[in-house]
Amino acid sequence: MATSQDTTQLRGADLRDGVDFSSLAENSPLLGHVDQEAVVLVRRGQQVFAIGATCTHYGGPLAEGLVVGDTIHCPWHHARFDLRTGEAVGAPALSPVSCFNVEREGSKVKVANKCEMKGRPPLGRTPASIVIVGAGAAGAACADMLRTKGYQGPISLVGDEEPGPVDRPNLSKDYLAGNAPEEWIPLRTREYYESIRVELLTTDPVQHIDTTKRTAILGSGRVLNYGVLLLATGAEPRSLPIEGTGLSHVFKLRTLADSRAIIARAAHVKEAVVIGASFIGLEAAAALRHRGLKVTVVGQEQRPLERILGKELSDFVRRLHEQNGVHFCLGDSPRIIREDRIELSSGKSIEAGLVVLGVGVTPHTALAEEAGLAVDNGVVVDENLRSSVPDVYAAGDVARYPDPISGEHVRIEHWVVAERQGQAVARAMLGIGSPFRDVPFFWSQHYDVTISVVGHAPAWDAIELRGDLEGRNATAIYRRQGRTLAVATIGRDRESLAAEAAMEQGDTRALEAALRA
C-alpha cells in the first residue's frame, strides 16, 4: 500500500518501563513507544491492549483515533485495526500493525515483546478454488483477506491493466499533482502476490463466465475453474457524444496509464480544461493548478457538487478553487473539442492544450449479463454480497447492494466501500462472514482541505451547517424527514469517526451526541 512518511513521532512514555494502570482512561488511546516504534495502549475494562500507533494506509496517527469495541479507527481515512491482533479488519488499510504482549506488575502496565501469530479459528467452508475477476480495490482487498483468514486454496486475481492493483484515489490527487512518487501507487507488488501464492494476471482478462461449468475463460483461451467467484469489474469512465473526444489531448482519468498520460501532456501545455465539476474533476483541476497550468472547469450545473454537498458547501468548494486560480464556466456544456480549444454551447471558446473528462462512470456489467446474473444499474446482490447465481459474489463499483440505513438497493462508487466489500466477500466465501453493514465513507482532497463524508444521502430535505467553513472547521448534516443520512466534515476527524460508528450501530442518540460534540 502506498504510504506517506510516518507522521507519528516517538512521544510519550517508554512503555517497556510501564505506566500506572490508573493513568489509562477507558477506551482512550495512550501514545508511547517500544524499541523505537510508536505504540498505543488502550484500556477496555480490566484488559489493556498494545498495538502499533501508525496506520498502514497513509501513516495516520492511531492515538488520535476512535476505539469502537475491540477495534481502533484511524482519524484520517477510517481504516480499522483489531486491538487484540493488529489485523487490518477494515479498509483502506490492508496490512496489519504490530501487536504487543502486555504484562501487569502490581499497578504497572508494561509492554513486552511483539505477539506471535496465533492459530486462526477454523473456516466455515473451504472452496476448492477462488477466481477474482477484477484487480481493483475490491479484488485486491478480497485476495488479501482470504489469505489473512487462513484460506490455503488456489486464488487467481485477474485484471486488465498493468501493473495490477493500484492506489486509484491517488491518481487524481497527490500523484497527479506531482507530490507522490510512482512507487507509492501499487497497492501490492507482483512479488507480494507470489509470496502469498496468489496468481496475478494483468494482461489476459476474463472474456466469459460459465456459471454452470463454474469456469472463467480468459482472452487467451485459458480456462480457470472456480469453487466461488467474485465479480469486481468496477466501472468505466463515460465519454461525451460530441466531436473531438477521440483527439490525442483528451483524456479520461481512471488508470495509472491515464494519469501518466495526463502528466506527460501537462509538461508541454499551458492551458487545461476539465469537463465535469465532479469530485474527480475538481481534484484533477487542483492537481493541474499545482503543476502551474491555467485551468478552467466546465459543468452543466450552476454550482459544483451541489447535488452531493448542498449549496453552502458547494459554494465553499468553488471559492476554494477560485482562490487557487481555477476558472469556472458553469451552466454550460462543450459543443465541440478542437485541437487547441473547446467551443461551448453558449458560444464561448476556451483555449485548451489538455482536456480531462470527469463526467461520471458506468458499471462494467457485460460479463454479469452474459453469465445470467440479475443486473439493474449494477449487479444486484443481497446483504452478504451474493449475486442471483450460487457462489458468485459482486463487490465494488459494479455491485448494487441493500443499504441498511435506507433499506434501498444502492450502488456506491467509493474506494473504501469497494475495499471493505472485497474484505466482506472474502469472509463470506469462507463461511465466517456477516451481512455487509458498513456505512459508506469517502474523502476528497482540494489543496490543503480534505472533505470527509460518512453515510449516503442521494436526496435530503434539510442540511444543518455547524462550525466555520472559512476556518476549515465545520460539519454539514444531511437529513430527510428528521433522519440523519450523511455527515460531511472539514477539520473534524473525530466527529466523522464517531458519526460513522453511531450510524453503523443504528444508535440515533449516540449519533446526535457525536454531532453535538
Image: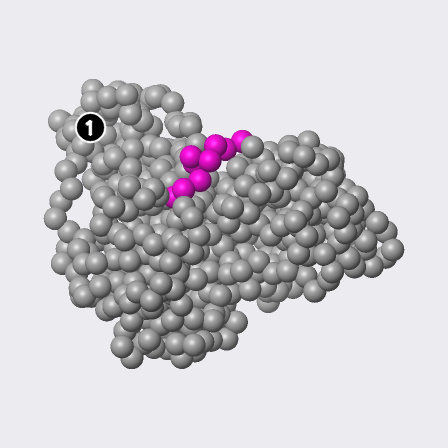
Residue 121 higher or lower than 194, as above or below: below
Q: Quadrant of the N terminus?
A: top left
Secondary structure under badge 1? strand
Magenta highlight: main SS: loop
Quarter location, residue 260: top right
Q: Nearer the viewer, residue 48 or 121?
A: 121
Amino acid type indicated by mark 1: Val
Image location of residue 479, percent across then percent down: 59, 60
**How many numbered marks appear?**
1
Image location of residue 128, percent across then percent down: 18, 66
Label 1 sits on residue: 111
Q: Nearer the viewer, residue 193 or 96?
A: 193
88 sits left or right of 371 in the view: left
Quarter location, residue 287: top right
Image location of residue 67, percent across then percent down: 35, 43
Residue 447 seen in the current view: yes
Residue 431 higher or lower than 12, as above or below: below
Q: How is the image coloured?
A: one colour
Image location of residue 336, percent across then percent down: 77, 57
Q: Is residue 183 magenta?
A: yes
Q: Nearer the viewer, residue 335 or 379?
A: 335
Q: Give the residue displayed 28% in from the left and 58% down from the top.
A: 156
2 sits left or right of 271 in the view: left
50 sits left or right of 230 in the view: left
Q: Give the residue displayed 53% in from the left and 37% down from the top.
A: 175
Q: Residue furthest front?
A: 220
Q: Nearer the viewer, residue 512 or 49?
A: 49
Q: Give the residue displayed 47% in from the left and 70% down from the top.
A: 365
Chain part drawn in magenta: 179-187
Q: Residue furthest right?
A: 347
Q: Is residue 205 magenta?
A: no
Q: Give the residue displayed 74% in from the left and 39% down from the top.
A: 271
